[in-house]
Amino acid sequence: MFKFIHAADIHLDSPMYRLEAYEGAPVEEVRQATRRAFENLIDTAVGEPADFLLIAGDLFDGSWKDYNTGLYFVGQMRRLKEAGIPVCVISGNHDAAGKMTRTLPYPENVHVLSHRKPETLTLDSLKVAIHGQSFSNPAVTDNLALAYPDPIAGWFNIGLLHTSLTGREGHENYAPCTLDDLRLKGYDYWALGHVHQYEIASVDPPVVFPGCIQGRHIRESGAKGGVLVSVEDGAAPDIDFQAFDVIRWEHVIVDVQGVMSKQECLDRLKESMEVVVREHHPQPVITRLTFDGATDAHAEIAADPGNWKEVVRSAALSEFGEAVWIEKVIVHMQAKQKDHKTLSDPGPIRELERLVSEIASDDDSLKDLAGELFPLFRKLPAEYREGENAIVSDNPEQIRRIVEQAHALLVRRLKKEAPGS
């Protein structure tokens, strides 16, 4: 029997993205997250102990700012050397992009497979053969697996490959191949990298993405780590996911349908977050919150979204402390529908309410309005013109939310300016 750890997409010293710092946020803990996750991986390898470690690409995140990243990696590899654990690494698209990742000598227990052609590392005492090829450039579009060597008869053969197979959402289609391409090689295990979500793409033979070891943004949510693989003669490999991350990301939907007040919205927030905190304890959770549903509190919240964001952060900090950090607050609330009698009441505020109700209930009217506002949208800051926050003029639901927020702001201003107010 022997066992090994398969990890990938470590992105050592890569920063976390879009985390808006606020009072009390442990900035240093966030900055060191990838190193601490990597140390958890090394601790597990030494503690088991693992017979060897596989890293299936993207060990680094491109060019180093300085040599500290490389020196840190060498120090961790020496720990494995002292424990008698060999390491086999291939370079992925981010490693190939970095010019400094090839300039430091690694301990002799670290084997980086060639980028010129497929190479095989043999561990004679275990009768294990590891076949793989590093990326020669940041965008390899050839099917590298086709050129991998035939398996060594009577040995346990592993294919080490950085690929998205036939494609995975959010990942460039590098080193593309099919499951049949891999199965036909006759290997006993395929150790893949590049896709940041844990996935067993095939059971016989195992074709495994371990995912990244530390989530860095909201698209890398949930537990992150690698796999511990145990191999016994005559049995299928046993694959056990191991969490190595020190901080988790989650997108939490807070259902406020039917609530009557801001305080009830905060109560719903507490209920939703209690579930998330309990699930991920003891790791702290960076959360993106989306408040969704029709509520009487909509107008008050939409009229001052900046205040609501800080109220939510304050409530989360008060209730959960450093177990929860808020990355972003999204308001997708809607106003409760008013009956026709109420909408027909006289007065400018009621007339405005009637007009907004007519526009918001008709997709064609929303598209026409978006067309009128398009020149204004083009003058907005870049964050509202590009990326996930971009305003899309042909998205009626997004335009509807903008109309409802503008309505709430205008009503608030009209009430403030009304005589006697």
Image (cartoon, helix red, strand yellow):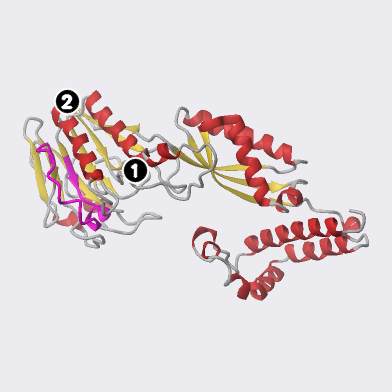
Q: Residue furthest left?
A: 124
Residue at the image point whose x is 67% and y is 75% from the top = 372
Q: Which residue is mark 2?
A: 1
Query: Observer-nearest residue: 364 or 236?
Result: 364
Q: Which residue is mark 1?
A: 211
In percent of width and height, residue 147 lies at: 14, 56
Q: Is residue 117 above or below residue 324?
A: below
Q: Is residue 258 visible?
A: yes
- Choose the circle earlier in sequence order: 2 or 1: 2
Residue at the image point whose x is 50% and y is 41% from the top = 250
Residue at the image point whose x is 63% and y is 72% from the top = 376
What distance separates the C-alpha of mark 2 from that of mark 1?
25 Å
User: Which quadrant of the figure has residue 212?
Assistant: top left
For the image, the number of numbered tags is 2
Nearer the camera: disc 2 or disc 1 = 1
Residue at the image point whose x is 58% and y is 64% from the top = 391
At mark 1, the secondary structure is: loop
User: Which quadrant of the figure has residue 260?
Assistant: top right
In percent of width and height, residue 293 lies at: 69, 47
Point out the stretch of residues depicted in magenta: 88-110
Query: Observer-nearest residue: 28 or 337?
Result: 28
Q: Amino acid at mark 2?
A: Met
User: Which quadrant of the figure has residue 338?
Assistant: bottom right
Q: Is residue 171 above or below residue 277?
A: below
Q: Amino acid at mark 1?
A: Gly
What type of secondary structure mainly makes up the magenta span?
Answer: loop
